Image: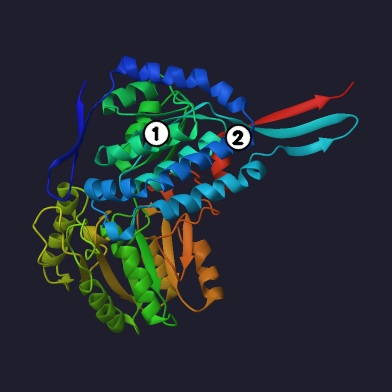
Amino acid sequence: MTTVKCISPIDGSVYAERETLTQAAAQEAVARARKAQKAWAARPLQERVDLVMGALKEIENSTDRMTEELAHQMGRPVRYGGEFGGLQERTSHMAKIASEALAPKVIEESDAFTRKIMREPHGVVFVVAPWNYPYMTANNTIGPALIAGNAVILKHASQTILVGEHLADAYRAAGVPEEVFQNVVLSHDTTSALLADNAFDFVNFTGSVGGGQAMERAAAGTFTGVATELGGKDPAYVRADADLDAAVDGVMDGAMFNAGQCCCGIERIYVHESLYHAFVEKAVAWVNNLTLGNPLEEATTLGPMANVRFANEVRAQIDEAVAAGAKAHIEKMPADDGGAYLTPQILTDVTHEMRVMRDESFGPVVGIMPVKDDEEAIALMNDSQFGLTAAIFTKDVEAAEAMAPRLETGTVFMNRADYLDPALCWTGCKQTGRGAGLSELGYHALTRPKSYHLKKA
């Protein structure tokens, strides 16, 4: 048995500490989930929907807990009020479309045959959730999985260990049986052993590329479905016809919100050469208006990064780029302590030879490059091992639609960035991983098709 600690980025103190389950206790938890799942799946769909929505209501009634604990655990400023708005939007949408998304597809209903495709729950779904948007990313899978009739085992990130407990409290208070949704604290070794032992029927993992590879290796040979959302290096392209002020606001918010710790945050910016200098000037002014500081203070608009080691990686990328000829535009801010509190940075004179334009930064830094046309922008946007989202800022819808099929990403935005629409499929390609979250396709990922071919006497 080991101990998991959440080190608060606010002051480096231990904010929460939990013991991991032994392998035997973890196996017992899965066994309880498996035993309870059949009865859960047998409940009417609307009843499951109502219970999931009841859990959402429980969280709504405890948003103060959400906001304060998030500030302490991963540094998000309290002024932004936690994650309830996005959580409500996604969960409500998935509840609304459940009956249609899970409905049988009837091929024939005649005197001679009934032929249809049904959707059946996998069984026990294992959710491994990240710390950066710990409520929304976890419940992207938990809510739909439960609605579809699965039991769920949640393993949350150590940085946001209390989020798993808050979610479990909410689901239990709403009336979801505690065996059907369980929050567990597991070591990496126990997690790997469970996967290798074929404990789960489906796995949803959000995290690093290395973590996703470890999950797939552990599950190798078990034929367990493993859906992954891994790294990102999402680009934005500002065309010559873009609304410059709107582009600056949209792109820089996408790059800096949550201290840049967003799965689909903007990490590379390409600006048409005719707008380049004006864009950089406005972007620098935008960042200089941020207030780096303690996330518990209302004046703070940019909190610390979730962990000192995350901030150190961003500093290393910035230092390497500057040493290689990049120009840093933001002076060190007073709250920058050389630890988790990190000055946001804009870099120009960058190239794709630099790690800051190639490796995931996952922090408040962005490089900006001029481009001469759409062709150069497309080539640079695609010059990445990752493929989650890409954003195009333009007034020309036809031009954006022509570019979209050529961009190697799971989502293409126009005139916005860093947003997850629950009616659309959340997915990626290349080393961002493979999977389908939210939308009707999210339900398809969390169930298996079963064909009925009934010849009538």
Q: From what the image shows, is residue 375 above or below residue 200? A: below
Residues at marks 2 and 1 touching, judged by CB atoms closer than 8 Å? no
Q: In this view, which residue lies farthest toward the front?
A: 61
Q: Is residue 172 left or right of residue 214?
A: right
The percent coordinates of residue 122 (x first, y second) are: 54, 29
The percent coordinates of residue 161 (x first, y second) are: 28, 37
- Of the numbered discs 2 and 1, the one sitting upstream in the chain is 2
Q: Residue 290: which numbered mark, if any?
A: none
The percent coordinates of residue 271 (x first, y second) are: 35, 76
Check disc 1: other Cα within 10 Å, few if <14, some if 14-19, many if 20+. many
Check disc 2: other Cα within 10 Å, few if <14, some if 14-19, many if 20+. few
Amino acid type indicated by mark 2: Glu
**Tag count in the figure?**
2
Q: Which residue is mark 1?
A: 168
Amino acid type indicated by mark 1: Ala
The percent coordinates of residue 409 (x first, y second) are: 45, 56
- Image quarter of residue 295: bottom left
Q: Quadrant of the N terminus?
A: top left
Residue at the spot x=76%, y=38% of the render?
Answer: 106
Q: Is residue 29 left or right of residue 351?
A: right
Q: Could one spot residue 371 in this view of the protein? A: yes
Task: Return the residue nearer the eye: 228 or 27.
Answer: 27
Which type of secondary structure does the marked residue at label 2 adopt? helix
Residue at the spot x=27%, y=24% of the render?
Answer: 189
Q: Is residue 310 left or right of residue 114?
A: left
Q: Is residue 401 left or right of residue 60?
A: right
- Image quarter of residue 185: top left
Residue at the spot x=40%, y=77% of the render?
Answer: 246
Q: Residue 47: which numbered mark, if any?
A: 2
Which type of secondary structure does the marked residue at label 1 adopt? helix
Q: Could one spot residue 349 in this view of the protein? A: no
> What is the spatial separation of the Cα atoms under label 2 and label 1, in whole angstroms?
18 Å
